Each structure stands twice: as C-alpha cells, then as structure tokens.
Image: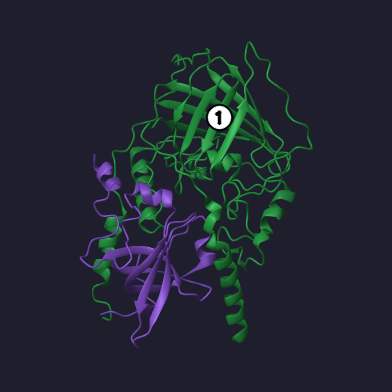
Chain colours: A purple, B green
Amino acid sequence: MRNMVLALVGLIPAAPIWAHHSFAAEFDEKQVVKLHGTVTKMEWVNPHAWIHLAVQNPDGTTTEWMIEGNTPNGLLRRGFTKKSLEPGTEVFVEGYRAKSGDYKANGSSITFKDGKKLFLGSSHDEESTK
Amino acid sequence: MRYPYLPLLILSAAAAQTPPAPALPQAKAASNKRYTPPKTAWGDPDLQGLWPGSINIPLQRPASFGTRNELTDQELAARDAQEKQRVEGGHWIEYYPSNRQASLIIDPPDGRLPPMTPEAAKRNREMRDGLGPPSLGGVERRADSWLDFDLWGRCITKGLIGSMLPGNLYNKGNQILQSPGYFVIRNEMVHETRVIPVSSSVDAGRPHVGQDVRSYMGDGRGHWEGNTLVVETTNFVKDIGMNGIAQALLTDKLRIIERFTRTAPDQLSYDATVEDPGTWLRPWTMHVPYMLDPTYTLYEYACHEANYGLSDILKGARATEAAAGKK
C-alpha cells in the first residue's frame, strides 16, 4: 500500500492542546491524516522541525507533504539527530492536517518500514529507564 | 474495517512516545534554612549551575484544595498519570516528573491567581490571539494579523515570569552564572539572558535606569540578604504575556521581586512575587523548587528562524472564513 490516505477517524490519541502556537488555530483535529511516503528532506529549524515527505497518490502523482515536529532541542534530547531521517527513508506518519488546506500536518507518530517507532530505543528512553 | 491495523498502531505509537516513568519524587524536602551554600572566590553564596524547570507543578491549584499545598500519594499518582496522557497526546512534548507541591502559587494562600481588575479582564477577553483555545465564551477568535499573536507566538519572549515557570512543554533549561558584581540567568526558552548588577559590601550597585527605558525582561537589580539573592525587576514594556497562554497580558506597572536561595547542594528555592496593579487586585507569589541537573544541556533556541506557525494560522483562519462563506 503506497498511497495517501485522508480519513476522519476518532481512534488516534487526542490532539495536543499545547504547542508553541495554538494547535487548534493551526491544525484541524477533525482532519486526521495517515501518510505513507519517503522522506525528501528535513528542515532542522526552530521553533519546529519540518519533515518533507513525498507521498504517492493512488493516481500515480506525487504530493509533497510537510510534517511538523518538535523543536530541534526537544528532538535532540529524545535521541533524534540529523541522521535519524535521511532522505529516502520510508515512513508511515499519522497527524492532523493544517486548516490552511496546504499539504502540511502536525505529526503525532512516525513509524519506520520495519515497524520501529521514531523514538524507540533512543538515548532519552534508555536514560529514563535507569 | 477500513484500517484494521489502526488500533494496534495507536497503542504502540503511544507506548513509544511515552518514556518509562522514573520514580516519583518523595515529598518536597523542607527548606533547610541552616544549609550554608559554598562561596564564590569573591565571597558571595554560589548559586551557579544548571537548574532546569523540568518539574510538573501547575500554576494554580484546584479550589477544592483550599490552603493545602501538598498532594496525597493518590493525587500525586493521578497528576503523573495525567502528565503521561498529555505527553502521549502531545506534540512530542517533554515529560516532566510530577512534584508533590500542589501549585506554584503559594500566595494568596489558596494557590489561585488573585482577581483581575475590570480593565484587565476586558483586555484579556478581547485578545485575538493565535495562542490558547480558538474560542472563548463561545466566541470564535481568529487571528487577522501578525499583531494578533502574543510575544511568545512571535518568537520574541516569554517574559520574565513565563521564562521562569517550570514544566508544560519543552526547552525548560535554566543556567545561573555569577561574576563579581553580576548575577546572570539564562533561560533556554526563548534564549533569554538576564545580566543583573548585584550590590555588595564593596560595590553599592547602581540605581534602576530611567522610567523611559523599558524592555521585555525589565531592568533587574540584585542584593544579598544573608544567603538569599533578592532581585527586583521593573521597567517592563506593556503587553507581555505571562506564559504564552491567554491568562494575562500585563501592563508596564509590572514589578517582580525574586528570591534565590540554595537550600541544599542540589536544591534552589525560588520565589517570585509579582505585582501589577494594572492587572491584578493584589500581588501574588509563586515558589519553584528547582533541582540541580549538571547533565542538562542548553541548546540555542532560534525560535524566529522558521516560524511557519504564524502564516499557517493566518492562512487557516482565512480558509475557515472562506469555507463558512460558501455555506
């Protein structure tokens, strides 16, 4: 399955209330997106990192999505580095689409092709278990 | 079912996003007034170090607590469970261990912000802000301009109180540095640095700058009272948010008295009394039990470099309005 899925579902965790900006003003909690695509680049920028994802549509065209992540500081503390999402990496993303209608979403989870989650086994998690 | 794997994915994603819980802290140790902190080479109490606000204590406590400011074991567990739920549903936000202190506010004794002046209440009702809930009192609020965002949303500052408040998001690092005649505090969010002149037995210090000179973080002056550094800060600009949330936009009458006391090798007692007669009917005081964490790293937080959120929110507001117009 290599396509873009837009769906209205009520099963994913509650949309975040807190962020640097109002989540509710920027994103639509009712518009859940589930994307399967390939990382084209990552903007390691403040106040939020953005992952660019090439998502192939059912009609064969490709859409470039931007997925918002945490601040680079927070990513670093969770063991995330610039090497964590190299271009060409295939990922599954869940999130909430921007109200603007742009191909942007707030990422709530990222899963690699082998089923590993983005932060699983990160240095942060290891430290937390000590 | 169209997405049969979805529940599994959700559960596993939530598990992956929630760091294993460290042991909850024990009851807050009573401040050890008799502790004598180490001295700097020039003889001042040494408060230097990394004191991150990685602590989960809400600003206010529920009205049902009354004057009680310590959680029971059950309440502490509930607070921590709520924090984990918040992190799971969050925006890759950081998990902060819960503290037994019921609220940051210790005065008024009920741990609640005092009532606002009528003018302040009106000012805050009328905020059109990209922060906070998009509706207040049933009225939909949408940003029309970049000016509708508060100073944090625009990546300028969280203000002094917001910078010192612990918990709730990320980048809560604080570092204290001292040199003869100066006290420096760095806040990771939003890369603030206050350089505060401190008077001493050999340096009478210097008066505040004139009333016409105003800034986001104000003009601070420090002096020692025993082992406690007391910092008085005035000369603020108006309309500084308190915590990046729609709780209060403050006035230029703001005056903050902070008290920094090292009460153990790894404990820093911090009290801040906030006076703003243009906002609240009386002053209030918060207490933060900072803990030393020499392993913490402060990273640069160049918040302004790609603040796409503002344009996304403005475009989202226009798209919402356009969609409503078509109905």
Within-10-Å neighbours for mark 1: few <14, some 14–19, many 20+ = some
Reply above or below: A88 against B82.
below
Observer-nearest of B255 and A69: A69
Quadrant in which residue A117 is drawn: bottom left
- In x, y percent, where is residue B191? 53, 43
- Seen as rendered, the residue at the extreme left is A114
Q: Quadrant of the C terminus of chain B?
A: bottom right
Quadrant in which residue B29 is drawn: top left
Q: Which residue position is annotated with label 1?
A: B184
- Can residue B20 be seen in this snapshot? no
Q: Which secondary structure, mark 1?
A: strand
Reply above or below: B68 against A53.
above
Identified at 54% across, 55% down, the residue is B305
Identified at 47% across, 14% down, the residue is B39
- In x, y percent, where is residue B183? 57, 26
Identified at 62% across, 48% down, the residue is B241
Q: Please state which amino acid type lies under the numbered disc 1.
A: Val
- In x, y percent, where is residue B90? 40, 57
Quadrant in which residue B307 is drawn: bottom right
| B87 lies left or right of B42 | left
- Seen as rendered, the residue at the extreme bottom is A59
Reply above or below: A124 against B130.
above
Observer-nearest of B125 and A43: A43
